[in-house]
């Protein structure tokens, strides 16, 4: 997508279709056609948004996050708050029924204090967290930096009475 900003200059970004719109994965300003072609090529070749983002960063000369750097960032993100939910969409507007179901489960169990992260906002986190936690789907709920699981695991924990004890006390404040 490009927007003309004057003679010979434009602002453009490329992305993947998200829940309700295109998710921005990069931006370039000026008439850097090779850069735009590289980004679009990565997407049209069936690549992920993360791959297209990397291609765009390389073309623009922006440092690309290494796997080690990403893993450090992910380790910090899962500990950002004592309870963290990585989901599709936002707390006030979950995108998928599974994210919505986890939010309902948390409410039913009296969990009031937790953070959320919309995985559509950052393709690197969206792909990297799957590998980091060896869990292929979203949503993912973490307590004190440890993965509890997705909706099916959480429902099982509620059923067997282990859910509340797996969360820190401050989650219920």
Image (tube, helix red, strand yellow):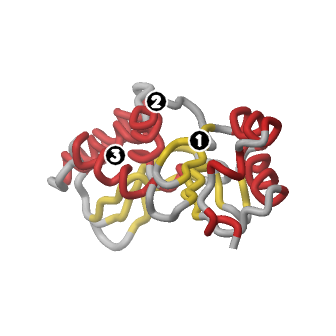
Closest to the observer, 160 or 33 = 160
Bin the neighbour count of mark 1 within 10 Å (Cα to Cα): few under 14, some 14-19, many 20 and up.
some
Between tags 2 and 1, which lies in front?
1
Of tags 1 and 3, the one toward the viewer is: 1
Instruction: Provide residue 145's location: percent of width, then percent of height.
Output: 46, 51
Q: Nearer the viewer, residue 64 or 31?
A: 64
Q: In the rendered view, would you say 146 is above or below 171?
A: above
Secondary structure of the residue carrying tag 1 is: strand
How far is disc 1 from disc 3 in space, using C-alphas? Answer: 30 Å
Q: Residues within 10 Å of mark 3 (few under 14, many from 20)?
A: many
User: Percent x, y for residue 99?
Assistant: 71, 47
Residue at 84% across, 57% down: 108
Judge by depth and name the residue closer to the eye, 141 or 96.
141
Q: Earlier in the sequence, mark 2 or mark 1?
A: 2
Quadrant of the frame with the C terminus:
bottom right
- Taking the spot 80% from the left edge, 56% from the top edge, the residue there is 109
Task: Classify mark 2: residues with Cα within 10 Å, few (<14), some (14-19) or many (20+).
Answer: few
Rounded to the nearest angstrom, the CA distance separating label 2 from label 3 is: 23 Å
Q: Are marks 2 and 3 in contact (CB under 8 Å)?
A: no
Secondary structure under badge 2? loop
Residue 159 appears at what percent x and percent y? 82, 37
Identify residue for label 1: 148
Disc marking residue 53: 3
Task: Write down the residue under mark 2.
Answer: 134
Of tags 2 and 3, the one toward the viewer is: 2
Of helix, strand and loop, which one carries label 3?
helix
Say left or right for 158 vs 41.
right
């Amino acid at each position: 997508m490009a927007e003309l900003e004057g003679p010979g200059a434009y602002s453009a970004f490329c992305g993947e279709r998200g829940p309700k719109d295109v998710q921005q994965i990069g931006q370039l300003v000026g008439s850097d056609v090779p850069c735009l072609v590289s980004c679009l090529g990565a997407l049209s070749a069936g690549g992920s948004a993360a791959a297209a983002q990397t291609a765009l960063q390389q073309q623009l000369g922006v440092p690309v996050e290494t796997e080690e750097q990403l893993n450090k960032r992910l380790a910090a993100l899962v500990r950002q708050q004592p309870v963290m939910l990585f989901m599709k969409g936002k707390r006030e507007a979950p995108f998928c029924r599974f994210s919505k179901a986890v939010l309902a489960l948390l409410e039913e169990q009296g969990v009031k204090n937790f953070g959320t992260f919309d995985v559509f906002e950052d393709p690197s986190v969206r792909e990297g967290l799957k590998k980091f936690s060896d869990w292929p789907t979203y949503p993912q709920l973490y307590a004190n930096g440890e993965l509890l699981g997705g909706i099916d695991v959480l429902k099982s924990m509620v059923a067997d009475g282990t859910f509340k004890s797996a969360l820190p006390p401050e989650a219920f404040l």
